[in-house]
């Protein structure tokens, strides 16, 4: 077996602090440590506020060149919720139909602070009717009145970059039918934000936040009169970041597929804006686009959505197709490892597996303990999923979503394969990092006469229990059957001694384990009377059956599915294979197979003509 790529050649994580371990209710080990901001973070915030106020004093109302074409896609139903005054902030459902968006909530949490990036403006623009426009104009004007002089949490480079992109993109929507003095205030505020970014983009964290800051500055320099002088240095900085932050294979250090999509969307948008302005995008930018696009094609399922790992979701509807179309010449997704993930595809079935250790250090603030977890999609219907990122539903759901039991893989004794450690040291230390990640993750693919076989393993429990998790997956050539084997085993005398000590200390007859398969909420699941088979029915009528051997019990249990834009987690179910590891090798075999119709034909649930990308029909 060969070892999967780790983060060789990338920026090293910041030094860790000395933790005091505690055990959380979600099974992930956490640390007792003060969350007070470091001096570096306080200084950065102070400088942001200082430069925001300087920029606000120097700003002038500027004209916009032309009428920028809207290219940011929002959610229609979310726009309806906003017009009705329904908000979800930091896990709290707030109904305030007569209040400004800046008046709701108490102490600003992550979601309340994210409002200052104005992503919700995309949703109101997607709705696009008179009430939606009135809300958007009122809330933008209220933001200028409350925070436009440089106050509030929205004056960070990343949020300012997001805000400028949306204000310029939706400028026609925001300026339609308003008074002349309101237009002057709007354009003066745009000028202030551009001046702020010109001074502060360097302080944005490397990765997506830096790309957002530079994208906002470049957009402003192209569209706002008098800002042209900021364009050359901003474009040069973007080119440098494309070389340093995007790997030769198109990967980013966070391993978040949706974050990679957002970066591609920004880069293709910038390249398009530069072309429209009569300029040429730098070679590092176009080369980065060429590297990222095929990688994202390998990380999408047969329904067109991205694999949901490490804090990422499926992606905003239509955004991936839009970004890939702007990326230009189509390249086939390369075979093998895609940013630490691997992909099995046959006919209309795709399986995507996390085949590498999670990121570490500051790159792991949203990472999950998901090593060897899988997702399976049949045609246009997700079947086996991971719970996803729970950050939009409050800190408890966020923490639970990062744990191994929230993923479709094996977990032992309530412990995650990577542990949730303390915040790091330095400027980017506000959230918990992953620690004690697997030291080795291996993945090997073998073609079979009638399909494809993957052998994977990780040692995330070797130090704590002496056990290595090995997973074998076989997908048939027709995509109708996925057979799996999960094994917990020791690999030598030291592991055996550690396993014996753990077993003796537990005071039980064995070490409890569970292999979980979280189901999409649209899947109807039921067990047979004997409890030996689980039938799974997709909305199309397509049926799959699941059976196993080797586990003590197979049960159907409650689960949740985190979906951005929903007011609460969606209830769903999970198939759980549970048992006790009592020896040096414990094995569970299982099979997920598509049922045959009585007529002998396969169920079909096809997209409208032309809506399913060709590369999703191909095996990489």
Image (cartoon, grey):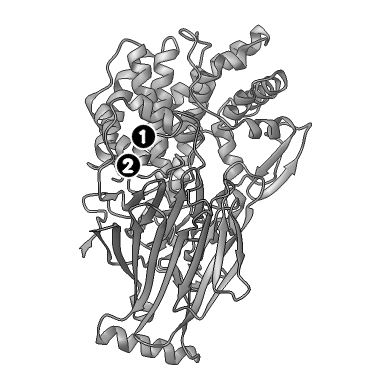
x, y percent for residue 211: 38, 33
Q: Which mark is residue 614?
A: 1
Q: Quadrant of the C terminus?
A: top left
Quarter of image, res 85: top right
SS type, badge 1 = helix
Instruction: Look at 32% across and 55% down and name the residue there.
Output: 13
Instruction: Look at 29% across and 61% down and name the residue there.
Output: 453
The number of numbered badges drawn on the structure is: 2
x, y percent for residue 365: 44, 53
Q: Which residue is mark 2?
A: 618
Q: Residues within 10 Å of mark 1 (few under 14, many from 20)?
A: few
Q: Residues within 10 Å of mark 2 (few under 14, many from 20)?
A: some
Q: Using the image as rendered, state which of residue 51 and residue 616 is in the foreground.
A: 616
- In this view, the residue farthest toward the front is 599
- In this view, the residue farthest toward the right is 98
Quarter of image, res 446: bottom left
x, y percent for residue 536: 56, 58
Is any atom of residue 565 visible in this view?
A: yes
């Amino acid at each position: 077996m060969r070892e999967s790529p780790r983060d060789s050649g990338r920026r090293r994580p910041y030094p860790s602090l000395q933790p005091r371990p505690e055990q959380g209710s979600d099974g992930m080990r956490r640390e007792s440590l003060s969350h007070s901001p470091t001096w570096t973070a306080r200084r950065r915030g102070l400088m942001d506020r200082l430069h925001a106020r300087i920029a606000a004093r120097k700003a002038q109302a500027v004209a916009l060149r032309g009428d920028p074409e809207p290219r940011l896609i929002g959610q229609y139903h979310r726009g309806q919720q906003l017009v009705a005054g329904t908000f979800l902030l930091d896990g709290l459902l707030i109904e305030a139909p007569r209040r400004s968006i800046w008046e709701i909530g108490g102490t600003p949490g992550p979601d309340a602070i994210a409002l200052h990036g104005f992503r919700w403006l995309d949703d109101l623009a997607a709705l696009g009717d008179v009430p939606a426009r009135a809300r958007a104009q009122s809330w933008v004007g209220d933001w200028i009145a409350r925070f436009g002089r440089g106050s509030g949490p929205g004056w960070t480079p990343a949020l300012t970059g997001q805000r400028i992109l949306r204000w310029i993109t939706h400028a026609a929507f925001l300026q339609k039918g308003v008074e002349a003095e309101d237009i002057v205030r709007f354009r003066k505020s745009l000028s202030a934000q551009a001046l702020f970014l010109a001074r502060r983009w360097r302080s944005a964290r490397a990765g997506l936040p830096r790309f957002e800051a530079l994208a906002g500055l470049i957009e402003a320099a192209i569209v706002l009169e008098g800002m042209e002088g900021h364009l050359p240095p901003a474009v040069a900085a973007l080119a440098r970041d494309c070389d340093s932050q995007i790997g030769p294979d198109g990967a980013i250090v966070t391993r978040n597929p949706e974050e990679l999509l957002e970066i591609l969307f920004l880069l293709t948008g910038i390249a398009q804006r530069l072309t429209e302005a009569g300029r040429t995008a730098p070679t590092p930018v176009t080369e980065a686009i060429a590297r990222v696009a095929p990688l994202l094609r390998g990380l999408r399922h047969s329904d067109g959505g991205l694999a949901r790992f490490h804090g990422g979701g499926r992606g905003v509807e239509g955004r991936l197709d839009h970004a890939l179309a702007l990326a230009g010449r189509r390249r086939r997704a390369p075979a093998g490892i895609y940013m630490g993930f691997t992909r099995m595809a046959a006919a209309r079935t795709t399986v995507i597996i996390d085949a590498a250790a999670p990121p570490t250090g500051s790159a792991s603030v949203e990472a999950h303990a998901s090593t060897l977890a899988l997702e399976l999609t049949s045609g246009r219907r997700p079947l086996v999923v991971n719970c996803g990122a729970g950050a939009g539903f409050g800190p408890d759901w966020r923490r639970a979503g990062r744990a191994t039991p929230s993923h479709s893989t094996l977990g032992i004794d309530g412990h995650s394969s990577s542990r949730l450690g303390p915040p790091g040291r330095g400027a980017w230390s506000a959230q918990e990092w992953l620690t004690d990640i697997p030291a080795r993750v291996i993945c090997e693919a073998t073609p079979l006469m009638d399909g494809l076989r993957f052998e994977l393993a990780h040692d995330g429990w070797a130090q704590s229990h002496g056990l290595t998790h090995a997973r074998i997956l076989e997908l048939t050539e027709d995509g109708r059957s996925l057979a799996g084997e999960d094994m917990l085993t020791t690999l030598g005398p030291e592991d055996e001694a550690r396993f014996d000590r753990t077993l003796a200390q537990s005071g039980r007859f064995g070490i409890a384990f569970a292999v979980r398969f979280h189901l999409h909420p649209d899947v109807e699941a039921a067990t047979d009377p004997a409890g030996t088979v689980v039938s799974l029915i997709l909305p199309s009528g397509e049926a799959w059956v699941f059976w196993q051997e080797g586990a003590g019990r197979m049960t159907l249990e409650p689960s949740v599915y985190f979906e951005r834009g929903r007011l609460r987690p969606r209830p769903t179910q999970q198939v759980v294979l549970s048992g006790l590891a009592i020896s040096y090798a414990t094995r569970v075999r299982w099979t997920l197979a598509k049922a045959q119709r009585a007529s002998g034909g396969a169920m079909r649930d096809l997209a409208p003509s032309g809506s399913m990308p060709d590369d999703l029909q191909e095996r990489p």
